[in-house]
Every structure is written in structure tokens, then in C-alpha cells.
Amino acid sequence: MSEHYFDDVESYELKGMNHLITWLLHLLAGLVILTIASTILAFQITALIAIQIGFSITLSESFAIGALQLLIAVIVSYILIKLSIAIQSSELWAFSTSLYLNLLLLILLATMGTIGMIFIFLPIITLISLFLPNIREYWFPLFKEDMGPRIKEIRYSLYLVRKSPLVVAGVIIIVSFVVLAFLAPFFTPYGPEQRIWADYNLPPGSPSTDPNMPIHIWGTDDSGGDVFSRIFWAAQVDLRISVTVVAVAVTVGTLIGAISGFYGGKIDELVMRITDVFFAFPGLVLAMAIVMALGERSLDNIAIALMVTWWPGYARLVRGQVLAEREKLYVEAARSIGASDMRILLVHIIPNTIQPIIVSATMDTGGVLLTAAGLSCIGFGPPAGVDEWGLMISIGQFYYSIAPWAVFFPGFAILMTSLAFNLVGDGIRDIMDPKLRRR
Amino acid sequence: MTESEYLVETRGLKKYFPLTGGVFRKVIGKVHAVDGVDLHIRRGETLGVVGESGCGKTTLGRTILRLLEPTEGEIWFDGKNITDVKGKDLRHIRRQMQIVFQDPMASLNPRITIKNSVGEPLVVNGIARGPKMRKMVLELLEKVGLTEDHLNRFPHEFSGGQRQRICIARALALNPEFVVMDEPTSSTDVSVQAQTLNLMKDLQDELNLTYMFISHDLSVVKHMSDRIAVMYLGKIVELTPHDIFRYAQHPYTFALVSAVPIPDPRFAGKAQILSGEVPSPINPPPGCRFNPRCIFAQEVCKTQEPELRDVGDGHLVACHFAGTLDFGKSAQQEYAEATGSM
Amino acid sequence: MKLRDFILRRMILAIPVIFGVLVITWFLAFQVGDPAAMYINENTPQSAIESIRKAHGLDEPPHIQFILYLTNLFQGNWGESTSTSFRPVLEVIALKFPATIELAMLAMFFAIILGIPLGIISATKKDTVVDHFTRVFSLAGVSMPIFWFALMLKYVFYYQLAIMGLPHLPGSFRYDDLMFPDFKYTTGFLLFDSIVFEHNPRLFLDALAHLAMPAFCLGYLTLAIITRMMRSSMLEVMREDYITLARSKGLSERVVIYKHALRNALIPTVTVIGLAFGGLMTGAVLTETIFSWPGLGTWAARAILNSDLAAINGFTLLVALIFVTSNLIVDLVYGTLDPRIRYG
């Protein structure tokens, strides 16, 4: 009985006290959560930056940003909501947890940050660790041994290249165009969008009307743009377009053609009918229609249209090669030792079909350049003012009798670049021809 | 027919190739490449398969390895029916059965070094890679008489005989039980041929291999084989454990044997040359397939197809008159008697 | 029998191709723009727009419209070209087709006449200055931007000669309509019409002068292709054993080249010539635009820029048909030239 009484009294006395303490605890918890939340915010931002940089190097950007932010937000908000509910219902564990919550979150953030850092440094670390003496010893001799014969072959190819003046000329032109395109910001006297309206249609070599500006080496166009500068700014655009278009077309065409040739049957029949359809189209007209159907006349749309029209050529080429290669004995030999289809295709068939693909890809880079320039020349390109060779001709053609240089130089640049790619492609064909190689 | 006795068996094995034509590319006929073959190959023996070109011996070899899908019939390997095995199991089976092709240059990938070509079976089947693979490949190459210098070369840097030995090394990489030799020596000259054949025999003794030795060269087959099967138009017409030069029972075998040239001018011009062409395998003649060219052909040969039957000691012949025909002496037999050899 | 089967098979195979072309162009063109836009302007009342849409079947869902288009196509109604004053597409094609074909034929003529001899010379004089020059010349043809080449030709042979007061080549159109104001087309082939129907050699020469630059410009690419093909196949053939045999028989080099080698080297070249005809159609779009040539190419480019759906569809269908037929003809010619080829 007495115990019960004391209990009662104690509880009664403590009631007011309890209220105060509970209130104070709530306040404390609120403060802690607030500080934690703000620290989290700061930490999260730094960690996210680290993570995102790390991921964007290795993974695709959208995934890195979207998924990780979501992950952190979900974890943090889950903990905070759970805690607030617990504190609301005055559960005692919640108060103690909120005290070391910042520790928990710090650990979480540290982990995430470390992951981000790892993703930043992973490629570098791997690369460095590969060259550590005790790891290097494991792979390097084998690598060297494997590469030895290949390097011998490559060296011989280079020797053949050096012997052929046309290929050397082509390589020099391509390399100098690429280098000049990249160095355009440093040596061109005028910026890409810079116009001096008073300087319209000046012949090559004439000084600018503005005494502070350098002379126009190759003259100016109708809007006072410096032709010399514009051509090298445009080289960036044109080379990028032709290389990307060919790269995409080669990849897609090779994959489709290889699968179609390798598996044959229904897939093959379907793919061949589709390529037939593309071949029956006048390529330029199809590209025009695609550009228009995409809605906007721009270089990107021209690139897309050319990708769509160009892959069937490669699909055909690769299919034919694969069909021939598939019947070779070494493919059957590989099959007899239990190699999978994928391995046969990737290790045995595609490397042996790659030569004609390289040749035609090189030559097509010139072809794509011509077609892209042609498209923008007849009005399917971007609006005037953008630096692109075809467009410069397109605008210049209205003034070709008074300012022929504004047409001549961009066209000549197209001709030289395209010629260079064709020279190299032609040369590679001869060099890779097994009949002419020592065997 | 206990499991231990026969390593490979075929039961009524058939392989037809479709022929297409017309507007819609319909199947208008079939090439009867292998048309009902029953074979048993014992453990550790060499079965020689001979026949003219186009008689289906290569197709037979490839079908047994499941490199070609059989049209009909069954293939048994090591007591298991492997006719319908697919995917992983098939690859597992293939580790125990290997093939050496006729043309060693074509059966090596020209862009891959010898080390990787020979090591490919090891890598594909997850047995070894890296330095371990290199060591195993080196052992294999040494077994066939090549050295470490050869490891990192491309196929085109080798001679024909060396290439064939590389192919043999590759076939042996997986430690198979059964190897099909598909005319392994036909693209090399005679001196190299002898070397290669002896190497194969040594390897057989060393590794306890079972061979199916396909060739059109009778003397080579005789040198290599314990038993010899003679094929004609997709069928086995004779299967003999005896000396094929002396005890031929089928008229076709006899004709083949007597066509082997003899290095002695006294016997020149004595060979029996088969008349006519090999009939088309698209429409093989009814009855005995050999009847249009057989000098002993009777009425029954044109209507009834002879079964492969035992004429004693496991000597099987597919002829209605097996054992009763008198071929006379072939030039070879006379020559053998004259020189006291064979 | 074999030949008939072959032709029949090729024709059956061509049906899905043509159908595929139709589907792709139609749906692409459907994306390009609203055909009704050509019939209305800002003054058209809203109710009229609805009725215009209904009248042209444009209120239906796309697949119904496509089927409608197909049925019309089979009845010989290819639609009306809105960018060419609403005339029926077939009529416009009939009007403009001869101009393009005449241009393409002359371009092909240039290419063959120059290309084959150049290829032969280049191959027989391999690795000499002549050969190097020919190779660069033909590679330049492959990498030549046609539109720029056309402008440069025009600048030199039209503008520069004209301002110097020299006789010059005309830079645009098919004939000088100031000199021949009352000329009317009969067949549409100007070179043919001028002689046969008009009996006017001056018109003929004028038309030829007008054709010269565009045809050369258009033909240069084909010329380059033919030269390269001729050279490589000639070199290939010259390595064959039967050429060595012919030489060892004591035949003169002339006979060896022109009688034995040329005939076999021509086979792949003929194929290339046939296939290049399709390429001429593409090149025509660019050349015709620069030279204001009233042909199909200009029409097609303008049609696409103006969202003229019927014209786009009509043009691609026509080119696809030409392509399929020329491929078939190439294969047949190939068969007659090369006795080893059997149809099947």
C-alpha cells in the first residue's frame, strides 16, 4: 500500500517537472534536427557535386543526377519523418536517437561522398595501379607478347603508307584541317559570329574599314564576315558532323548487317528488304524529307537525316562480308571447340570483315561532308549566320558575280577535305589488299 | 554393345541438303549427302573412311560432331544419345570430340596469333587464361614439335605441315577422346605427309585417342586405320577390319583398290578403270547405288537395295553377291606377290 | 524459262520495295506539313477550312488517308502538286521529266565518252604521270561538291566570259526564250523537238549550249566513278592468265588490250553505269537548283521546302520505279555480257 502511495505522490510531484522536461526535450530535439538538416543540406550539396562529377565520368549524366539525388533524398527524408513521428508520440528512443542522428547522417554522407570520390578517381586509380611493379609484372609481359606481332604488322602498314604520296597528302590535309579546326580560337583574326557590316563583299587581302581590325586575308562575305576566319570556325562543325554521322552509321550498320548475315533466315530477309527500300530512295531527297519531318532546319537534323540514310549501305556491305566469312573453315573450327555465337561474331568474323568497312567509312566521311553541305546549300540547313561551309556557299551564291571569293573558299575547303578522305580511303584499300601485301 | 566397347555410334544417320529454285525459291530437291549410315567406332581404334570426292565422307564426319544438323537418325557418343543435345550440353559434348580440317590455312584465323588460336579452346571453356593458358599452349605445341618461337606468329608465317600440326595441337587442347581427321594430309606434300601421319599415330598411343580418319588416299588410310569403311554416294558399302588391298569384297572397293597406281612399269595399264560418272546424289539410282557402274550387276541389283551384312570376322559388305564374286587378281595383288610385301 | 522466272522473281521482290518506299515517304511527308495549309490563307473563314479538309479527306486518321492515297494512286490519280499551281502530279511529271532525262542522258554520254578511255589509259600506263593525274582527277570527281562546281563553272564560262564580251555559255534555263519566243514543246526533249518538229538548227545549238554546263557538272561524278571502275577492273583483268596467254601467243599489245582485256573489263563498268543512273537523279536536285533547270530536281526540292506532299510522294515513287527498273536492266545486261552468269 505504502509503496503505492509514494509512487503516486512521486508521480504527482513529477508531473509538472515532467511537462517541463518533455518540453525542453522537444525543443532540444527540434534544434538538433534543424542543425542536422542544415548541415545535411550543406553536406549533401558537396557530396552530390562529388558524386555527380564522379558518375558523369563513368555513367550517363541523367542517371547520375536523377538516381543519386533521389536515393539520398529518400533515405534522409525517411529518417527525418520516422523521427518526427516518434518525437510527436514522445517515444524515448527518439530523443536519444536525435542526439546521435547527426553522427549517423555524417556516416551516410561520408559513404556517399566516398563513393563519389571513388567514381572520380576510379579510372585514374585503376590506371595507376595497373602500372604498380607487382601488378605490372602480371599482365605486361603477356600484353607485350600479344602486341608484338600486331605492332610489326602496323609498322609494315605505316611503311606502305609512307611509300604512297597520295595517301601522305591526304593524311596531311586531314590532320591539318583537324588541327586548324581545334586551334581556330587562337589564330583566326575574327570570331565566329563577328560581322563588320561596313566590310561587306571586300576582295581578298583588303584591309578592314575599322582601322583597329586585322585585314581580311580571303575577303569578306555579303554581311561583312571574314571568310578566312569563318572557314576555320566552320571546319569544326563540318568535320564533327561528318565524323559523327559516319560513326553512328558504321556502328548501327555493322551491328545490323552482322546479325543479319550471321543468323540468316527471316531476320536476314527482313533486313535486306528494308535496305532495298532505302536503296530505292534518292538519298538526298530522303534526307531532305527527314529534315523537314523533324520540324526544324538545323545541322543536328541534317546529321540525323544522314544517319538514317547512310546505315543501310554499311548493313549491306557487312552482311555480304559476314556471309562470305561465315563459311570459312576457321569459323567452323571455332564452333567445334565450343565457342559461343557472340564470340564467333566478335572475335572471328567482325575483325576479318573490318577492312572494307574502314575503307568505305573513310571515303564516306568525305561523302557525308558533301551531302551535308549540299543539303544546307539548297536551303535545308540552319539559318544564315551559322558557320558552315555549305551555308556559306548558299548565301554567297546570290553575290557570286561580285564576291566570288565568298563562294570559292568554302567550296574549296569542302573539296580539299573530301578529296583528302577519299585519297586516304583509296590508299588504305591498296595497302590492306591482301594480294599486294606480303603473305 | 556395351558402353565401354563403342565410343561413337550412328544409327541410320542421314543428312540431306535442300536445293531451291523457281520464282519463290521453293525446295525442289535434296542432295543425299549421307543416306543412312550405321557405324560403330571402338575406343582407341582408328576407323578409316574412304571414297571418291563427293561421296559424303566429309559430311558424315561433320554430322557426327554435330557441326551439321542430322536430317534423320541418331548419334551416340560414349553411351549417350547426342542427336538432340543443345546449347551448353552440346558445347560440353564438343569438348570431347574434335576435328582437324582438310585445309589448315583456312581453319586458322589469319588475324590471330598461334598462341591465341591454340589457346582459344582453353579460354572458351574456362580452363585457363593468361600465363596458365600460355604454358598449356606451349606444352601442346611442343607435343606436336613446335617451339616457343612459334607462339607469337600469324598463320601465314608457317609452312603447310606446320600449320596442320598447329591444328592438331588445337584439337588436342581440350583433351578429347575422339578426333575426326578430315583429309588432314591432302594439302601437304608426301614427305611432310608421312611426318604428320606418324605424329598422329604417336599422339594416339600417348593420349589413347580414337580417330575417324577420312581420306581419299587408300594407302594412307590403310597405313593409319584398324578398320576401313568404304563410302559410295552417301552409304557405306563395305566395312572391313582386313587388308583392303587383298580382301576387297564389294565390286566398288575392288575398283577403287585396283585404281591405285603402282610404281612398277610391268604392271602399267592393268588397272580396272570404273566406267561412267558418279550418279547425281540428288536422285540416287534405285536398288544398289553402284548398279549402273557395276560389271556384275544383275536384275535384283536394280530393284533391291542390299543390306550391310557380315561375311565373317566383322567384315561387312553391302552387296547381294558378297563373297561369291570373283574379281580375279588386281594389279596390286600381283604386284604385292611379286615383291613379297604388303 | 529460266530468264522468265528470273524476271518474274525480281518483279515480285520489287513490290515490297516500292510499297516500303511509299509508306516511308507518305508518313514522312505527313510529318512535313499540313497539306491543307496550301489551300487556305488568313482570309479563309473557319467553316471553309473544315470543308476544305473534308473535301481532301484530311479529316480522316493518317492510316485511312494513306489507304485513300493508295487507292487514288492505283486509279492513276497521284494527287495535285500544290506548289505548282495545283496541277495534277502526273501532268507535272510529264512536263518536267523530259528536261531531267535529257540532262541525265547527256551527262551520262559525257561520262561514258570520257570515262572509259581515261580508265583504259590509266590502267595501261599504270604508275606513270598520266595514271596519277587520272587518279587524282577521278578522286576529285568523287569528292567534288556539285553545287559549288556548278557555281564555279557558271562564274568562269558564263559571267567572266560575258563581262569580257566573249562568246559564253548560258547559265540557266533550257533555251533562250527571248530568241525563240514562239517555241512550244512537243515531246519535251528539246534536242529532239528542235530538229524533228521545228526544223530549227539554231534552236538545237542553243539548247545544246544550255545543256553543256549542267550536263558536264552533273556527269563529272559519274565520269569519276566510271573511270575508277574501268581502271580497277582493267588492272584486274590484265593480271589474268588468259592475258598472259594472249601475249605469249605473240598478239600485239593493242589486240591484247582492246580485244581480250577490254571486253571483260567492261562488264563491271556496265553495272556501275546502270547503277549510277540512280545517282544522277540525286545529283540532278543540286545541279538543277543552281542552273535554274526546269526539271524534276528543282521541283522536288521546292516541293519539300513548300510541304507539297503529293509532289514529294510522286517524285520519290517515280525515282524508286526508275531505280528498280534500271537495276533489273543492269542484271539482264550483265547476264548477256557475262556468259558465266546464270539466272537463279
Image (cartoon, coloured by chain):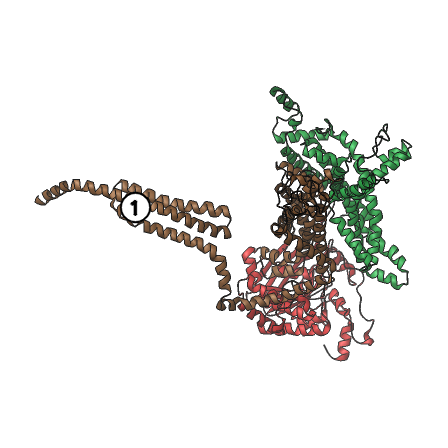
Location of the N terminus of chain C (image quadrant): top right
* Image coords of residue B205 (percent x, y): 60, 74
Chain C visual colour: green
| Image-quadrant location for residue C171 | top right
Instruction: Report the side of A111 relative to A417 (left or right).
Output: left
Instruction: Note whether B139 is above or below A92 in the view shown.
Output: below
Instruction: In this rendered view, identify the residue nearer to me: C180 or A119.
Output: C180
Q: Amino acid at mark 1?
A: Val
Q: Residues within 10 Å of mark 1 (few under 14, many from 20)?
A: some
In the image, A52 versus A320, the foreground residue is A52
State the residue position of label 1.
A32
Question: Residue farthest to the bottom?
Answer: B340
Residue B112 visible? The answer is yes
Q: Residue most toward the left? A: A2
Q: Let me know if residue A284 appears in the view.
A: no
Task: Give the colour chain A carries in the figure.
Answer: brown
Q: Position of residue A199 (x, y in %)?
A: 67, 41
Instruction: Give chain B's shade.
Output: red
Query: Residue C296 at what x, y percent from top left?
Result: 76, 35
